[in-house]
């Protein structure tokens, strides 16, 4: 059955406790904007005529977008005008981007890179590190870092002096919101947990900040 309107369309993809993946180009701005509330609260409210209902919608969002409408920004074959690029990127509002913790630019991979074997870390090793980091979080605070409230962040995500100074600088330089501040601390907490460290230090804060630089 087809649902109408942005919330109806979103309801189809907001499966509670799931990972959801979207491509920015598939959705209109108002649909993407409807993700803001559940990303923040873990719930979505749907109002229809005189009825209102609230559904749990705690999910992990994985979103992908091209750098410009054709996808080849910076290459000679890209014919997109600056206005077209701005309009394309304008589909993502500042408040929506503010709710995305990790932004990673993925450059195109050349054919020769594709055909040579990578000597990167094996997925099984990374998986074990993630499991250990999660167990560390549950032992410390009985919940994952992503679910910490602001009060709990103050309790469990205090950086050392160097980390605090770095975060203060980043707040001023990147003009971060209070939401951004708390989200950086949660990401830095996770980076420290992955490294098996109890204290959040400068390098953990620096790494968390660089995931939040926004769209370049
Ligand atoms: Zn282009």
Image (spheres, rainbow, N blue to C red):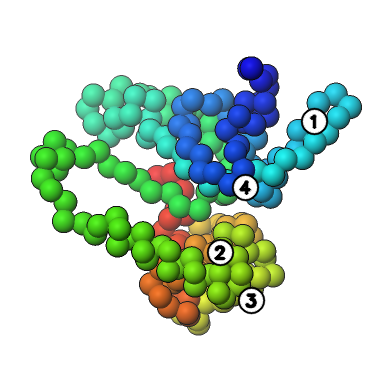
| Residue linked to disc 1 | 47
Mark number displayed over residue 155: 3
Residue appearing at x 54%, y 44% in the figure? 18
Q: Badge 3 local density, few (<14 within 10 Å), some, or many (20+)?
A: few
Image quadrant holding the C terminus, namely top left
Disc 4 versus disc 3: nearer the observer: 4
32 is higher (above) or lower (below) than 140: above
**Real-space Cα separation, disc 3 to disc 2, in angstroms:** 12 Å
For the residues bearing labels 2 and 4, Cβ distance under 8 angstroms: no
Residue 78 shown left or right of residue 25 in the figure: left
Q: Work out whether residue 31 or residue 47 is closer to the camera in this orientation and state it.
A: 47
For the residues bearing labels 3 and 2, Cβ distance under 8 angstroms: no
**Real-space Cα separation, disc 4 to disc 3, in angstroms:** 23 Å
Earlier residue among tags 1 and 4: 1
Mark number displayed over residue 212: none
Mark number displayed over residue 58: 4
| Residue linked to disc 2 | 145
Residue appearing at x 69%, y 70% in the figure? 151
Mark 3: which secondary structure? helix
Q: Work out whether residue 5 or residue 139 is closer to the camera in this orientation and state it.
A: 139
Mark 2: which secondary structure? helix
**Real-space Cα separation, disc 1 to disc 4, in angstroms:** 19 Å
* Place of residue 138 in the rendered image (x, y in percent of width and height, measured from the top left): 56, 69
Q: Badge 2 local density, few (<14 within 10 Å), some, or many (20+)?
A: many
Image quadrant holding the N terminus, namely top right
């Amino acid at each position: 059955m087809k649902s109408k309107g942005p919330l109806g369309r979103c309801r189809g993809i907001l499966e509670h406790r799931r990972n959801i993946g979207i491509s920015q180009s598939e959705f209109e701005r108002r649909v993407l904007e409807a993700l803001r509330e559940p990303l923040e609260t873990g719930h979505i409210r749907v109002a229809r005529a005189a009825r209102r209902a609230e559904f749990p919608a705690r999910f992990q969002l994985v979103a992908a977008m091209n750098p410009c409408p054709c996808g080849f920004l910076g290459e000679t074959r890209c014919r997109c005008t600056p206005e077209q690029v701005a309009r394309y990127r304008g589909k993502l509002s500042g408040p929506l981007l503010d709710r995305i913790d990790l932004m990673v630019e993925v450059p195109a991979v050349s054919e020769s890179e594709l055909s040579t074997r990578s000597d990167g870390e094996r997925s099984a090793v990374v998986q074990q590190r993630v499991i250990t980091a999660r167990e560390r979080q549950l032992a410390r605070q009985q919940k994952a870092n992503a679910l910490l409230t602001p009060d709990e962040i103050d309790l469990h995500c205090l950086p050392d002096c160097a980390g605090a100074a770095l975060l203060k600088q980043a707040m001023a330089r990147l003009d971060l919101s209070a939401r951004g501040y708390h989200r950086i601390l949660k990401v830095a907490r996770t980076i420290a947990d992955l490294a098996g460290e109890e204290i959040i230090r400068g390098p953990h804060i620096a790494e968390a900040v660089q995931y939040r630089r926004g769209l370049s």
